[in-house]
Image (cartoon, rainbow, N blue to C red):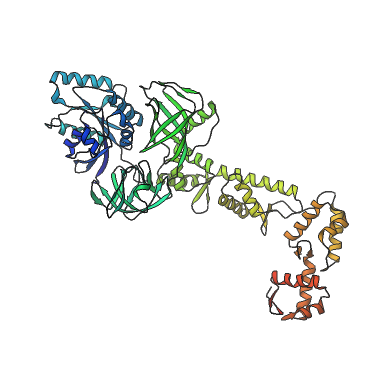
Amino acid sequence: MAKRMLTVGMAGHIDHGKTTLTKALTNIDTDRLKEEKDRSISIEPGFAPLTLREDMDVSIIDVPGHERFIRQMIAGVAGIDGVILTVAADEGVMPQTKEHLEILTLLGIPGSVIAVTKADKVDEELLELAGEDIRDEVQGTPFAEAEMVFIDSLSGRGLEELKQQLIQMLEKVPDRDPRGAFRLPIDNVFSVHGQGTVVRGTVYEGSVAEGETLQLLPQQTYVKVRQLQIHHEPVKSGSAGQRLALNISGVSKQDVHRGDVLVAAQHYTTTDRLDVVLYGATAAAYAVKQRGYVMLHLGTAEVYGKIIFFDRNTLEPGFDEVICQLELEEKVVTKRGDAFILRRPSPAETFAGGWVIQAQAEKHRFGTDTVSALEKMMEDTPEEQLMEAIRKNVWLSKEEGALYTGRPEEEVEQLIHQGLENGTLVSMGKKKVTSVQEQQKTLAVIKEQLQQFHEAHSLRSGQNRQELIQSHVQRGIPKEFAAQLIQQALDQREIVSHQQFIALAEFSPTAPKGWERRIENLQEQWQKDGLQVKAWNEYMEAAGLPEEVGRELKWSLLERNRAVKMDDTHIWPAEVFKDKALSLKKTFPESFTFQQAKEILPLSRKFMVPYLEALDASGWTKRKDDVREWLEQ
């Protein structure tokens, strides 16, 4: 039977026996700082292992109970599977009990047990009354149905019952998904002499093994996993739900901070703008104004930012649910569905919790239309989430699909497979897909652009392929996507190419209306001049062609290989160029010199030198010293 590894938080008011209870359960003192020892309070979260049964190991996190250390408390409970809410029998529910209760409720922690500590401090009648008071206080919260155990940590009363209640609670908690890409928010970093940097945290999802390369975000630094430990025991791998210590190389202790995130390389990105849904804290006393300053607690990160409302300018205390956006001062690592807490910096209070609707958010307009769109996004099915991700990104891989939807890669891979089978998705190369809608929409834009190009340049063969691709890049379409879509359209004969020029399938170059006769006269004179051509603008002036039409004609002749460039101002008729080359080859079938060429082609040096160089450039000949040899055609 596979062993389950879970994490349980120990929450409650200061001096309500959290650390003592943790030690009684695990025989480990989680107060590790000198200040904690001196003052008998927990400042940083402490961690201790507990084996509940052969197939279930638990990491107990003892979080700070003092109001000054609420930030550390939130970091401590990030990512836990359940919680033990401690309430001292001789004091009952206190201010920090209520705030912890509020935070745990807002984070949606799945499992809970209430431990009434210091049962030895009161008689049985008062103990019973204390239990009733606690039950009244937790009504309307997820703790309302939680089992309650009376504890005396010193004598051991209730400890075995508490363990059994923990087992029952955790059996109901669903397993974390080990299939996702590895993600571990860091809550502690230190260095070990001779080993280097060590980070610790709870694995949110995925798995990792010794020797793997991970990415440290938001720094974008690559690190290598040298060693792994779970509660000081070396292991070869770690997975979702486990408390893990990683000895990493490639970064110093000074460059890693609590709130940073270790992730599978190239599977996550950072963001500073989130679309979110908020749920109000019942104890909040102050309003929050539009673009008000807030502190986001997400995973183990604490980031300042501004709150942006779409349907109001003030958020009054006591609200139920609000959809809004967070504009952050620093980048964070998150994805759809991640829970968080929001606090006011001053006066300091927890006013809301919520979850991420969209991690890579865009700026939105103020109005109820935005709220309605985000409400719909909240209810989207996995298929709709994938299609929305494609709409925003044009195309994506399964890894990118997992990132933008917040769903495991294997699930996204299955969604993509289904979409390809039912015809809603289209393969774009080996790894990417797009929707039929995006494909057709972009193709329509390409065709419209080509139509406009043909109307403006009717003499030209088409638009240069790279220019066509780049024009779509400037509209926000990925370069590779535009290139592949153009190639697909060429393969299906929806558009055609003439060398590097792209045109609509039904298009053929034509002279602009009203200039047909003058263009014909120009070409007749140009052909008649053979290799001793005039500057192109002289032909234009003689024929009475406007500069724009003459320039387009020149481009058209070169694009369709009906002209060969002599220099920037002269071009030769391609037929004449070829005929003269064949005449020269007929007389000198193997090779020839400059003087021999002059015998056949009575040209001045002005035309002879560029003509022979053009033969070299176009692959007719190869020059070796003073001799040119003919090449295979």
Q: What is the total number of numbered labels drawn onto the structure image?
A: 0
Q: Residue furthest left?
A: 155
Left or right placement of residue 249 versus residue 466 in this view: left
Picture coordinates of residue 69, whole percent (x, y): 31, 32
Left or right placement of residue 608 versus residue 345 in this view: right
Q: Which quadrant does the C terminus fall into?
A: bottom right
Q: Residue 59, can we see it?
A: no
Q: Residue 617, can we see it?
A: yes
361 in relation to 560, above or below: above
Picture coordinates of residue 349, whole percent (x, y): 37, 26
Left or right placement of residue 17 versus residue 76 in this view: left
Q: Quadrant of residue 297?
A: top left
Q: Residue at x 73, y 49 (%)?
A: 454
Q: Quadrant of residue 299?
A: top left
From the viewer's side, name the closer residue of 77 and 112: 77
Picture coordinates of residue 596, whole percent (x, y): 78, 80
85 in relation to 547, above or below: above
Q: Residue at x 74, y 80 (%)?
A: 592
From the viewer's side, name the closer residue of 6 and 225: 225
